[in-house]
């Protein structure tokens, strides 16, 4: 879907310079005289320029508008079009000059002022944007964009409250405008709310799937979550979007490519950076990193020196120059660069390690040891420092690549943290192992709580069998038993140096990080383990589970699909994907995922249970019931299989069988809630209200008067027509555990009992006490309905709030459009159009759109909509038909109106008398 794009996203300095050159050359050719335009009039040039502009050929358009101005310098329309063309080309100074001149020449402020606002915004002149006065006559999209730019300007002036107000007004004016939604992304980012950021990114991309700002925000969010692959994909989309491609986009993508080993791709980004920002340090810096990875140290030194020659404020190149000098033995120069680096960045892990390497290179082992101890106090367990300690002990000399490795290690984990997982040990796999008796002796000591003895024995094993990973796994277990977490972590890391795919060590390290409250480190650890061992199914599935718990759905999908691709016969990844699909309300995908291995796992009860759940969710209850019966015959399926079977039988309307299975479930688990609730529902659906009431009393006797029993008891009473009892039960349920759902239940119970005032008063009080921000959209919708039953306009404020929460809320869009159709017809039409875009087949939405068109003077369009609607919606058919008949009358089509009004005058509905009066008034 196309949406209006913000011209604020066109600041591409390099691109703009290339456009300027093209315009200059073409303009020279035009002024020299072109046969096709020799003797053309001012109007010809103007008309041609507008055609070029509308076709997107901005250079040719600019030439034609300049031709007009050469003949008539005071031509206001040509001056305006040249200004907006230059704005699109990124020629901001020229655009500003020509648009201000067009305004002074009296060109329509309705056109000039919004364009000038975009110029000032693009130039970063926030105060000028905020000081501009709005003009009348803008359409809803222009109004929304006006407030969006004001919101961005307010954020630039650190005026968050004003920004919030402006962005809300943007959404109010046009909920379907992508920029209006993107304002909420900017607010969420500024507040550090990742959940809200993700929500509004999705809402923005739903309006414009190519919105550059939202794609960039998505990429940055992925980076913060450690999802490098997803981040790179998002930056690819940013760069391909055709919008505002910034220097930082190429820089970030280049670093990601570098980390993934795509040196050619990173080099391409470095080249692009040199072209886009030739005076900035980014291109040479990234180029230098690529050269370092390729082992081209002399070239890398030249590139890094170019980078620091362009600015003193960017410290990173100095770290790599320090590494290059250190590798070449130029330790004084290395230390000088480190001093400059630390002046800007302070002491971080990478520079701390580099100073250890310098001390080691100078042969000052005592100083190096002191620096290692100090570093490990700040960065406990850092494998790089521990490796340096081993190198000192073993007499390994500096200058063996350690300087460059140390500098590059800061790029490994998206933030300069420690390298958590060691690289694979390249030694052979043949090594002596302890006997079973030696191993069991350690385990026996642990079981007897003789932890000191266990540690002595396992350390002896580690000395005797230094290459056996399981010895170090056992050693880690001993340290855990002794409460020595750091020592345990070191032991498990020793395991991974010998066997990077050792799932026991990986799980143990993950648990240690989790127990220490370092969930982010746990996730980063598993991601790095997966990168080191991409073929390990166990590691991949563990990582997928962690990603799922963090709500990283796209990452989970990628991992599970990779597992299925690499291990097509494995059951666990397919079941994981199927469960995820079911959770996402996509049972067909779940079934398609399970189908290829269905024959091989026909006797697997867990597999068949999952398949049965997918069949039930897909609306195939008969097949689901048969599948659950098979699972029961296998004596498998776990807890809840009887309830699942009963639910399938209820949906198949096999109530007697369902009752039998449900009663068996109650007998097996008398305190369980779900089977008792299901029994009441199936008895009510069967029409056996007495038995349903008896089942309710039995649930109360077994479990007490809890909320679940009371809510279901209210449903039973309502089904039996005893509305007073239904109200009383819901009142008790809400008193026991007041929350949003019971508040709605109680309001509905009051209304069903004919007391709309009580329903409205109750829900008004609930929302006021809880605060609108703390209640669900469902509650606000119900309150809006209750208000509208008394006064249609009373719901307006709530619908505004609902649209601010979700600009794609069709019900709120439609109902607000209906409410505003007479008081704010232009805005109502935009709301109705947006609702129609989202739900083009909904009859009530099309009806609202038709009546909004009427209020905007577009009667013929409204008639077309209503003619297509007549007879489609049974409940609203008379009202729709009456509206159509009255429009026929307004358009002097009495013969078309007469049969409709005749039929309506004989139909009992709220507008019957109106129809009779209209019929009598026909000529």
Image (tube, helix red, strand yellow):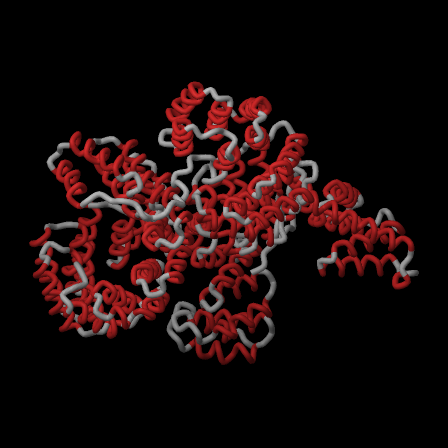
**Residue 654 in the image: x percent, y percent?**
18, 74
**Residue 199 in the image: x percent, y percent?**
44, 49
Left or right of residue 487, residue 921 in this image: right
Q: Quadrant of the C terminus?
A: bottom right
Q: Could you tell me which residue is drawn at 42 percent across and 54 percent down?
A: 554
- In the displayed structure, would residue 622 be above or below residue 381? below
Q: Quadrant of the N terminus?
A: bottom right
Left or right of residue 24, residue 685 in this image: left
Let me know if residue 151 appears in the view.
no
- In the displayed structure, would residue 883 be above or below residue 769? below
Residue 13 vs residue 912, the one in the foreground: 13
Q: Quadrant of residue 275?
A: top right
**Residue 592 in the image: x percent, y percent?**
36, 69
Left or right of residue 799, residue 824 in this image: right
Residue 633 vs residue 493, the one in the foreground: 493
Residue 207 vs residue 564, the one in the foreground: 564
- Tally the marks: 0
Q: Could you tell me which residue is drawn at 7 percent across and 54 percent down?
A: 701
Let me know if residue 555 appears in the view.
yes
Residue 255 vs residue 76, the one in the foreground: 255
- In the displayed structure, would residue 656 be above or below residue 12? below
Q: Could you tell me which residue is drawn at 50 percent across and 36 percent down?
A: 405
- In the displayed structure, would residue 492 be above or below residue 724? above
Q: Could you tell me which residue is drawn at 56 percent across and 64 percent down?
A: 854
Q: Quadrant of residue 38?
A: bottom right
**Residue 72 in the image: x percent, y percent?**
88, 50
């Amino acid at each position: 879907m196309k949406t209006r794009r913000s011209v604020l996203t066109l600041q591409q300095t390099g691109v703009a310079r290339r456009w300027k050159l093209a315009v200059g050359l073409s303009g020279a050719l035009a002024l020299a005289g072109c046969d096709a335009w020799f003797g053309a009039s001012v109007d010809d040039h103007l008309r041609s320029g507008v055609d070029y502009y509308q076709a997107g050929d901005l250079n040719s358009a600019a030439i034609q508008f300049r031709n007009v101005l050469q003949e008539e310098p005071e031509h206001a329309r040509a001056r305006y079009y040249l200004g907006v063309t230059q704005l699109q080309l990124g020629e901001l100074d020229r655009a500003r000059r020509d648009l201000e001149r067009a305004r002074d020449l009296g060109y329509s402020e309705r056109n000039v002022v919004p364009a000038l606002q975009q110029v000032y915004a693009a130039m970063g002149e926030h105060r000028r944007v905020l000081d501009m006065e709005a003009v009348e006559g803008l359409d809803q999209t222009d109004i929304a964009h006006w407030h969006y730019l004001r919101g961005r300007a307010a954020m630039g002036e650190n005026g968050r409250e004003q920004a919030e107000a402006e962005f809300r007004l943007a959404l109010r004016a046009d909920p379907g405008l992508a920029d209006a939604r993107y304002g909420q992304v900017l607010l969420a980012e500024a507040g550090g709310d990742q959940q809200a950021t993700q929500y509004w990114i999705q809402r923005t991309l739903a309006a414009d799937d190519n919105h550059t700002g939202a794609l960039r925000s998505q990429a940055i969010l992925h980076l913060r979550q450690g999802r490098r692959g997803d981040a790179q994909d998002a930056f690819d989309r940013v760069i391909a979007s055709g919008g505002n491609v910034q220097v930082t986009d190429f820089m970030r993508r280049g670093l990601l490519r570098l980390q993934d080993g795509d040196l050619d791709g990173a080099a391409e980004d470095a080249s692009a950076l040199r072209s886009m920002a030739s005076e900035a340090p980014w291109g040479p810096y990234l180029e230098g990193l690529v050269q370092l990875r390729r082992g081209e140290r002399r070239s890398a030194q030249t590139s890094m020196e170019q980078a620091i020659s362009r600015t003193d404020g960017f410290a990173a190149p100095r770290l790599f120059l320090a590494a290059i000098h250190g590798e070449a033995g130029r330790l004084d120069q290395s230390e000088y660069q480190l001093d400059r680096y630390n002046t800007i960045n302070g002491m971080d892990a990478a520079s701390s390690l580099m100073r250890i390497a310098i001390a080691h290179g100078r042969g000052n082992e005592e100083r190096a040891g002191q620096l290692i101890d100090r570093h490990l106090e700040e960065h406990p367990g850092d494998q790089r420092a521990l490796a340096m300690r081993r190198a000192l002990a073993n007499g390994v000399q500096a200058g063996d690549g350690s300087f460059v490795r140390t500098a590059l290690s800061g790029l490994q984990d998206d933030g300069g943290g420690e390298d958590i997982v060691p690289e694979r040990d390249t030694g052979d796999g043949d090594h002596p192992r302890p006997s079973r008796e030696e191993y069991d002796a350690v385990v026996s000591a642990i079981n007897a709580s003789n932890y000191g003895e266990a540690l002595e024995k396992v350390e002896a094993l580690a000395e005797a069998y230094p290459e056996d990973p399981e010895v170090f796994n056992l050693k880690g277990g001993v340290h855990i038993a002794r409460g020595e977490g750091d020592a345990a972590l070191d032991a498990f890391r020793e395991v991974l140096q010998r066997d990077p795919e050792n799932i026991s060590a990986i799980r143990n390290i993950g648990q240690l990080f989790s127990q220490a409250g370092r969930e982010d480190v746990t996730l980063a650890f598993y991601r790095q383990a997966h990168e080191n061992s991409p073929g390990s199914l166990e590691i991949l599935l563990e990582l997928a589970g962690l990603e799922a718990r963090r709500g990283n759905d796209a990452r989970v999908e990628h991992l599970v699909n990779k597992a299925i691709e690499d291990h097509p016969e494995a059951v666990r990844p397919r079941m994981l994907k199927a469960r995820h699909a079911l959770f996402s309300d996509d049972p067909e995908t779940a079934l398609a995922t399970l189908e290829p291995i269905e024959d091989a796992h026909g006797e697997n009860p867990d597999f068949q249970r999952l398949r049965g759940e997918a069949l039930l969710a897909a609306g195939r209850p008969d097949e689901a019931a048969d599948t659950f019966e098979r699972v029961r015959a296998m004596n498998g399926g776990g807890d809840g299989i009887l309830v699942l079977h009963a639910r399938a039988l209820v949906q198949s309307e096999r109530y007697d069988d369902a009752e039998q299975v449900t009663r068996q479930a109650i007998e097996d688990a008398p305190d369980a809630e779900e089977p008792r609730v299901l029994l009441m529902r199936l008895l009510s659906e069967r029409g056996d209200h007495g038995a349903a009431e008896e089942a309710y009393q039995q649930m109360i006797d077994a479990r007490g008067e809890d909320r679940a029993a009371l809510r279901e008891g209210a449903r039973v009473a309502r089904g039996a027509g005893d509305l007073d009892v239904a109200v009383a039960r819901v009142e008790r349920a809400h008193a026991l555990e007041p929350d949003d759902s019971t508040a709605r239940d109680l309001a509905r119970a009051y209304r069903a009992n004919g007391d709309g005032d009580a329903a409205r008063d109750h829900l008004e009080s609930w929302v006021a006490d809880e605060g609108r921000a703390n209640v669900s959209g469902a509650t606000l919708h119900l309150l809006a309905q209750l208000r509208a039953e008394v006064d249609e306009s009373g719901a307006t404020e709530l619908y505004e709030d609902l649209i601010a929460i979700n600009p794609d809320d069709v019900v709120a869009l439609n109902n607000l459009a209906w409410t505003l159709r007479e008081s704010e017809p232009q805005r109502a039409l935009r709301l109705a159009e947006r609702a129609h875009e989202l739900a083009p087949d909904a009859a009530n939405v099309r009806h609202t759109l038709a009546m909004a068109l009427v209020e905007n003077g577009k009667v013929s369009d409204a008639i077309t909509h209503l003619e297509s609607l007549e007879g489609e919606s049974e409940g609203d058919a008379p009202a729709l038909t009456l509206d159509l008949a009255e429009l026929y009358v307004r358009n002097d089509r009495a013969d078309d109106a007469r049969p409709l009004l005749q039929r309506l005058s004989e139909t009992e509905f709220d507008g019957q008398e109106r129809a009779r009066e209209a019929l009598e008034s026909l000529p």
